[in-house]
Amino acid sequence: QVQLVESGGGLVQAGGSLRLSCAASGRTFSNYAMGWFRPAPGKEREFVAAISRSGTTTYSADSVKGRFTISRDNSKSTVYLQMNSLKPEDTAVYYCAAEWRPSSTVVVTTTEQYDYWGQGTQVTVSS
């Protein structure tokens, strides 16, 4: 079992920044690919960003590319989502997820592939 706890959400004005953290426990963190998701109209959760086990490969949704950056610190068992130039449409609960992967460079971008999820952290962007 992997336990995931998100933090760092809050209220920010449009154009501002937030950094979300997701702390993992229970298993060897460096064995897991990680991702961030948020709810979207018509979807339970939409993909935001993902990072490989090693951290060498990242991928972001077009809607956040150039504004959001995913990173990880395996020594701290934590994955981060740096969110800059926030827009009101970024308002959502953000969830992190973990998936065991034998490959150190593969990213996982679909909700169905993730086995473990956090409880989420609320991000609200005011206009």
Image (cartoon, rainbow, N blue to C red):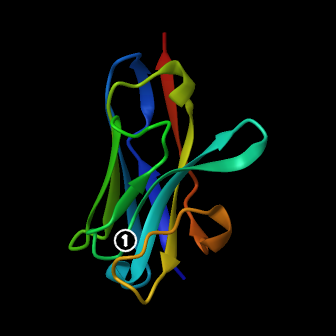
Q: Which residue is mark 1?
A: 52
Residue 19: x and y, percent?
32, 41
Which residue shows up at 32% across the image and 66% down it? 57
Q: Say how many tags the image has.
A: 1
The furthest residue to the bottom: 102
Q: Residue at x 43, y 90 (%)?
A: 102
Q: Residues within 10 Å of mark 1 (few under 14, many from 20)?
A: many
Considering depth in this image, is 45 or 3 the residue closer to the camera?
45
Q: Residue furthest front?
A: 62
* Left or right: 99, with 24 as reference point: right
Q: Is residue 13 above or below residue 116?
A: above
User: In the rendered structure, which amino acid carries the disc numbered 1?
Assistant: Ser
Looking at the image, the residue that sits furthest to the right is 42
Closer to us: 38 or 75: 38
**Percent position (x, y) of residue 45?**
66, 49
Please tell me whether mark 1 sits on a helix, a strand or a loop: loop
Image height of 116 relative to 95, above or below: below
Q: Residue furthest top?
A: 127
Provide residue 3's location: percent of width, then percent of height: 50, 71
Position in image of residue 64 (x %, y %): 44, 38
Residue 17, quarter of the rendered image: top left
**Which residue occupies the foreground of this view, 85 or 116?**
85
For the point 73% across and 49% down, the residue is 44
The quarter in which the N terminus is drawn is: bottom right
